Every structure is written in structure tokens, then in C-alpha cells.
Amino acid sequence: MGTVYVSQDDSFIGKTDERLTVKAEKKQILDVPLIKIDGLVILGRATISPAAVIELLERKIPMSFMTGTGRFLGRLEPELTKNIFVRRSQWDAAGETPKAIHMVQAFVRGKLKNYRASLMRHLRDYPDNDLQKWIDDLERAIDSLATIKAIASLRGVEGHGSAVYWQAFPKLIRADGFSFTTRNRRPPIDPVNAMLSFGYSLLRHDVQGALNIVGFDPYLGYLHTERYGRPSLALDLMEEFRPLIVDAIVLSAINRKAIAPKDFTSEPLSKAISLSNEARKVFLTLYEQKKQSKFKHPVMGRQCTYQEAFELQARLLAKYLMDETDKYPPLVMK
């Protein structure tokens, strides 16, 4: 099972028997059995046949639509699951409730611990790269979480921890031609931020799909405030996965020279930077490979892929909200 990414402009997505087909410039560029697909992401301009849409919805396969630069445009979802009890528990916990505070603590702890682990791994590989002061700062932020019981204050810790991590991030880049000063977006104005934003859009597609499978309303979150059209719970659950998946791919692509500075284009008016068509295919391949890579889940105690972990974490969240467990354990990798 995997996600199909269609990035060729003016392509046509259709269905033939039990297979999804993609054609462009009068050639067939993809022919894959529907049984092997668990998601479809369309980047840029493409046409999809009504038969293909119906088949994908009946198979409960979500479709996301993004611009060629990875900006999220919209999503076509199968019907929500009939598990109203998950959604009722989710709404009951909304606001400044003990459960909401616990989950915000967990989301922030998971993100900051994975930030810290990323810096520590890099320090082990490159002892001459002094990252200790940022690691210590993240450690203090993590230690403070258990004593803070106000969600606004927890958001402040998350903001501080993220600022610390992004200050250290330039030292993780070891290839010539790339630089990073601060996180920028809407639009990203340098190659590193362009890759980060593109990767986070892909991650959102996968995490929101997992929440939908379990039965959540992805628009009601706890760490992220309610905002019209914002899938706050998907953004909450993404936090622990950002450094594990997207940041790791970006650093790997740069440091292993899979993507080079010449692989980007600049939009003249907005100065937005985006991946070239070929580099985007390389990034999508790296993203899919990372999602399908296996690791031992620290809570479940068994091998799983990151693709499976999206749904596993959503199910652990549902169990906590429905009083089947006494805490939500974020996915933390050492």
C-alpha cells in the first residue's frame, strides 16, 4: 500500500477495470492496481474522471489537491466513520479541560523530544559540531512541561522550543550551497524552507487521513486553536512527526546531495522558491521511502512503518479520550 503522487501538469487520471491510470502528453505514465493505493495526491493541474473519483471514494481512499509548490488547496474525503463516540469524546475534552491540557503537554513533549533526539544524533555523528547549549535548552523546556497546567503557557513552551531548534538547524546542514537563517513560509523564500513546507503539506495529507479513518473531526484541536478551515487536530498530531519524517528527509536530501541548489526555481514577483519538476519527484520518492521504512513502535512493541504509525497514534489518542487508557503517549524516537 502507498500513496500515488501525480505531479505532471495537464495529466489525466482515469480508471480501467481495477487499476488507476495516469496519462500525459498522449502517453501512459502510470498504471497501478487500486488495491495497492491508500492515498492520492495531485500536485498542480490534472483532470480526474468521475469513474476514478467514485471508485476511490468507495474504496475510502482520500484525495488531496496541492499547487505545484506544495501549498495545500483542498481534500476529497470518503464519508466520516460512523463511530460517533470518538467525536463526542473529542468534543467533550475541548477547552481548558484536564484532558486537553494532558494532550497539549503530550504533543509538545513529543515534538521537543524528537527535536532534541535529532540534535543529539547529529552531535554523536559530528562531535566537533557544538550543539550542546541548544540540547540543554530543549531539555529544560521539556522538564518544565509537567508543571504547566495552562494551555496558553504550554503553547509558549512549544514556541520557545521550536525557536531553539531552528537556531540550531543551520549547523545540521553540511553541504555547500544551502543556508538557513529562520523558518519562513507563505511563500518559502529559500530552498531549505521550500522543502520543509512541501514536506509538511504531504505530512498533513497523511495525518488527516489517519484521523478520518479513526473517526475524529480533524478541525477540532487542542494545541492549535480553532480557525475557520484549519484542521487543528491534524496539525496537533503532526507535531511529533515533523522532525522524524520531514526534517529528516530534508537534511538527508541536502547532506547526501540528492537535491542540489540548482534544483530550485524562483517566482519573479513573490520571490517564492519551489522545487523543479525533477527535484520534486526525487523528494516524493524520499518521502514515500521514509513512510514505508520500519521501526519498532516504543508503545506497541512491534515493527511498523511510519505510514502505519499515523493511524496507530490516532487510535492511541482515541483510547485516551474514551477513557480506555490513562494517558496519550506521543511517538518519541531516540
Image (cartoon, rainbow, N blue to C red):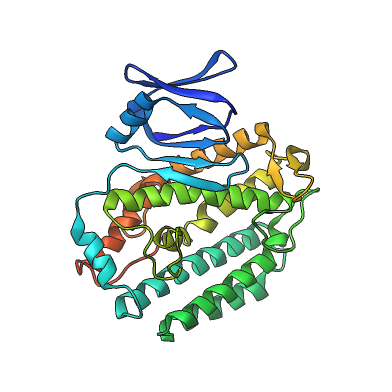
For the residue pair 156 and 242, the one nearer the viewer reads as 156
Residue at 47%, 81% (x, y): give it.
152
Q: Is residue 333 visible?
A: no
Quadrant location of the N terminus?
top left
For the residue pair 134 and 263, the one nearer the viewer reads as 263
Report which quarter residue 139 is drawn in. Answer: bottom right
Q: Is residue 214 visible?
A: yes
For the residue pair 95 and 29, the one nearer the viewer reads as 95
User: In this picture, is 295 found above or below 299?
Assistant: above
How many discs appear? Answer: 0
Residue 71 is left or right of residue 327, and the answer is right
Q: Position of residue 71 (x, y in %)?
A: 57, 47
Residue 143 is left or right of residue 183, and the answer is left
Residue at 61%, 52% (x, y): give it.
196
Report which quarter residue 94 is drawn in. Answer: bottom left
Report which quarter residue 70 is drawn in. Answer: top right
For the residue pair 67 and 287, the one nearer the viewer reads as 67
Residue 87 is left or right of residue 198, and the answer is left
Q: Position of residue 159 (x, y in %)?
A: 57, 73
User: In this picture, is 297 found above or below 152?
Assistant: above
User: In this picture, is 15 found above or below 250?
Assistant: above
Q: Position of residue 167 (x, y in %)?
A: 69, 68
Q: Position of residue 156 (x, y in %)?
A: 54, 79
